[in-house]
Image (cartoon, rainbow, N blue to C red):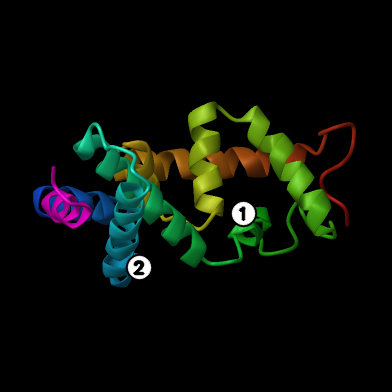
Amino acid sequence: MASRLETFEALVRAHSRLVSGAIRRVCSRRYRALVPDIEQEVYEAIWKRLGSGKEIEHPSSYLYKVALTTALAVVRKHAPETTPIEAISETSAGGPGPFGGLLPAERARLLAEVLELLPPDNARALRAHLAGFSHEEVATLYGWTPSVARHRIYRSIESLREKLKEGNLDGRSAARS
């Protein structure tokens, strides 16, 4: 029976390209510097799994999943803390938009209501965009082409603006001036 170290080294040798490829799928140019750190976290997770005595039945699938989830977690952790919600809420004239004068909790509630009204794929694309992901990253996350992701994001933003301008969500006016 192979030792833990031998098993680990065999897994790393056999699947290092798979792991780095999965990580690179998630990381845009903005996060390329994090790739070695993410790879290290993936290998630490594998080492811990082997140390717990649990067998890895389908190593390719397991390592791919661990690489993707680890990369997504690291990218989300390093994503900008502020979201582009202010850009969405501004009007084309540059004045205060539909969120003008609302407290952050009210903004979040209104945004959640509007997201529920969007088609599911558009809502997913907009949520990822609001979390700080670029359209290329959104495309990678959901298996779309960059143009499809960009289209879904922009259409969602436009729908969001229109629905907020209508202001009849929950019997309240979204715009307060």
Asked if one can make out residue 165 in the rendered structure from this viewpoint, the answer is: yes
Q: Are marks 2 and 1 in contact (CB under 8 Å)?
A: no
In magenta stretch: residue 144: no
Q: Is residue 126 above or below residue 103?
A: above
Picture layout, residue 176 above or below residue 151? below
Residue 88 numbered tag: 1
Left or right of 50 on screen, residue 7: left
- Name the side, left or right, on which 121 lies relative to 150: right
Q: In terms of secondary structure, what is the magenta stretch mainly?
A: helix
Depth check, front residue: 53 or 23? 53
Residue 52: x %, y % from top left: 37, 47
Q: Where is the N terminus found, in terms of image quarters?
A: top left
Mark-to-mark CA distance, 2 and 1: 22 Å
Q: Which residues are magenta?
A: 1-12
**For the residues carrying marks 2 and 1, which lies nearer the camera in this image?**
2
Point out which mark residue 166 bears: none
Identified at 50% across, 47% down, the residue is: 128
- How many C-alpha atoms fall within 10 Å of the one at disc 2: few (<14), some, or many (≥20)? few
The three-letter code of the residue at mark 1 reads Ile
Residue at mark 2 = 30
In this rendering, position of residue 59 left or right of residue 71 = left
Q: Does 138 sit above or below residue 102?
A: above
Q: Amino acid at mark 2?
A: Arg
Q: Residue at x 43, y 60 (%)?
A: 74
Residue 135 in view of the camera: no
Residue 10 is inside the magenta segment? yes
